[in-house]
Image (cartoon, grey):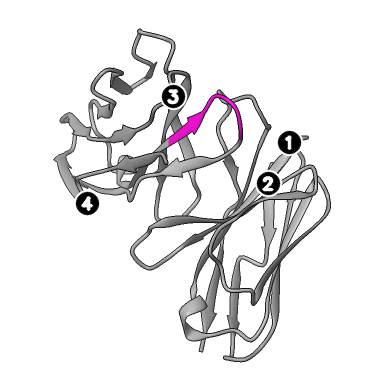
Amino acid sequence: AQTVTQSQPEMSVQEAETVTLSCTYDTSESDYYLFWYKQPPSRQMILVIRQEAYKQQNATENRFSVNFQKAAKSFSLKISDSQLGDAAMYFCAYRRNTGNQFYFGTGTSLTVIP
Amino acid sequence: DTAVSQTPKYLVTQMGNDKSIKCEQNLGHDTMYWYKQDSKKFLKIMFSYNNKELIINETVPNRFSPKSPDKAHLNLHINSLELGDSAVYFCASSPYSTGGTEAFFGQGTRLTVV
């Protein structure tokens, strides 16, 4: 069974600084997808970034980027130039290439300090 | 134009009552889900439907019964509500078999059982 582990229940970062959130996963598949979701206090789940396992290049979306290490089964999220609006719960998620099951980590609560 | 909408957003009810949460998606997706998010923010899959067929049914009390009248709707009915049912319930949808697409979430329903 696939599992997703986020080992940092809470993280904090100074405004304008950079922070990295960790995620590891366990799978025997070679083709899959990884996601980071953000859940602000409004509780809406918002996709931050997506990574295809077959791509070696790390995904980037503006201030958000990932460090995808397939062999190590690691998928960390880097937030650069942190802003107050980045304060939220962040969930790492895994999905096989076929099928429709998403596996979520337990989340990391990010605080941004002004 | 809301992609995944669920109603109501908030639901406060007494123990022993029966309640329903409705979900609709206008994205043309084949698959819909119900997730439960507890007070620790853990996201747990409850059910998944693909084209109105139940395909994931995690260990959930049989007081919870999903119903999918068509592939755009997935409702959740809960009988004999208990205090422990208090949580945020999320509906989500995704295309089936295209692993690269993320799950799209509704805004959540905060259920409080008193």
Q: Is residue A31 left or right of residue B50?
A: left
Q: Which mark is residue B29?
A: 1
- The amino acid type of the residue labelled 2 equals Met
Tell me where residue A94 appears, x and y as whole percent.
Answer: 44, 34
Say which residue appears at 80% left-offset and 48% top-offset.
B52
The crowding category of the residue bearing disc 3, from other C-alpha atoms within 10 Å (few below 14, some 14 to 19, many at least 20), is: few
Q: What residue is disc 3 on?
A: A29
Frontmost residue, B37 versus B107: B37
The crowding category of the residue bearing disc 1, from other C-alpha atoms within 10 Å (few below 14, some 14 to 19, many at least 20), is: some
Frontmost residue, A29 versus A49: A29
Q: What residue is disc 4 on?
A: A9
Q: Are marks 2 and 3 in contact (CB under 8 Å)?
A: no
Q: Are marks 4 and 2 in contact (CB under 8 Å)?
A: no
Tell me where residue B105 appears, x and y as whole percent.
Answer: 58, 46
* Residue A71 sits inside the magenta stretch: no
Q: Chain of mark 2?
A: B
User: A18 above or below A14?
Assistant: above
- The amino acid type of the residue labelled 1 equals His
Quadrant of the rendering where the N terminus of chain A is positioned:
top left
Q: CA distance from mark 1 to mark 4?
A: 32 Å
Q: Residue furthest right?
A: B69
Q: CA distance from mark 1 to mark 3?
A: 24 Å
Same-chain check, marks 4 and 3: yes
Say which residue appears at 35% left-offset and 8% top-offset.
A57
Q: Which residues are magenta?
A: A94-99
